[in-house]
Image (cartoon, helix red, strand yellow):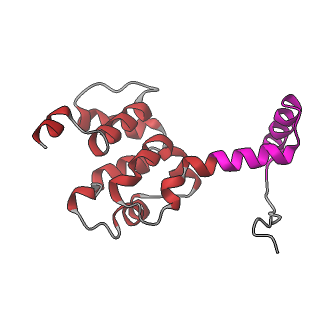
Amino acid sequence: MAKNKKQIVSLRLDKPDMNRIKEIAARVHSKEADVYRFALRLGLARLAPLHDNRARGSELIPVFAEYGSELTSSFNLDSKRLEQLFNDGVIEKAGLVSEEDLELIALSATPETYLYSRLRSLLGRSVTRGNALELLCEYLLNKYTFVDEDDTAES
């Protein structure tokens, strides 16, 4: 048997999503199945850190900074489940994601008004309608992934 054996998968989609798939396929002169495969590959590539069982703690921040609201709402991830996902198995304390930040990620799936006040007090600056998720992303990436120039000079 061939190693690249494919499998049929059943999927429930609502009518508007199915119509969009059909329209995209027609526009690019392709089969609907090609659009489904493309969307699936794209989604899996963006979620790659979640596929890596070794990725823990702050290593997962980039995917949640970028797609946190969609992930938390689609998979019903509350702060308790996020704590397990991020911090279970983290050995070094520097790799842990704080409870407060996990709560912010969980709040990203709620109406932005809940996130506004938390970010405003945390960042010490104004947060306006429409930029709360952008500021959350910036905050998380700066805190957990970007290295300050001062840190590199000390190394």
Query: Magenta segment, which residues?
Result: 13-42
Q: Residue 121 sits in which quadrant?
A: top left
| Magenta region, main secondary structure | helix
- Image-based side of 49 in relation to 101, left or right: right
**Horizontal and vertical percent position of residue 123:** 25, 33
Q: Is residue 7 above or below residue 12?
A: below
**Horizontal and vertical percent position of residue 59:** 37, 53
- Image-based side of 115 in relation to 34, left or right: left
The furthest residue to the bottom: 1
- Image-based side of 103 in relation to 77, left or right: left
The furthest residue to the front: 2
In magenta segment, residue 30: yes
Assign the N terminus to one quadrant of the image: bottom right
In magenta segment, residue 60: no
**Residue at 21 percent of width and 61 percent of height:** 93
**Horizontal and vertical percent position of residue 68:** 48, 46
**Residue at 32 percent of width and 43 percent of height:** 145
Q: Residue 57 sits in which quadrant?
A: bottom left
Q: Is residue 56 above or below residue 74?
A: below
**Horizontal and vertical percent position of residue 18:** 83, 43
Q: State how many labels appear.
A: 0
Q: Is residue 87 above or below residue 43?
A: below
Observer-nearest of 29 and 121? 29
Examine the rendering and report whether any part of residue 109 can be seen: no
Q: Is residue 105 above or below residue 146?
A: below
Assign the C terminus to one quadrant of the image: top left
**Residue at 43 percent of width and 35 percent of height:** 133
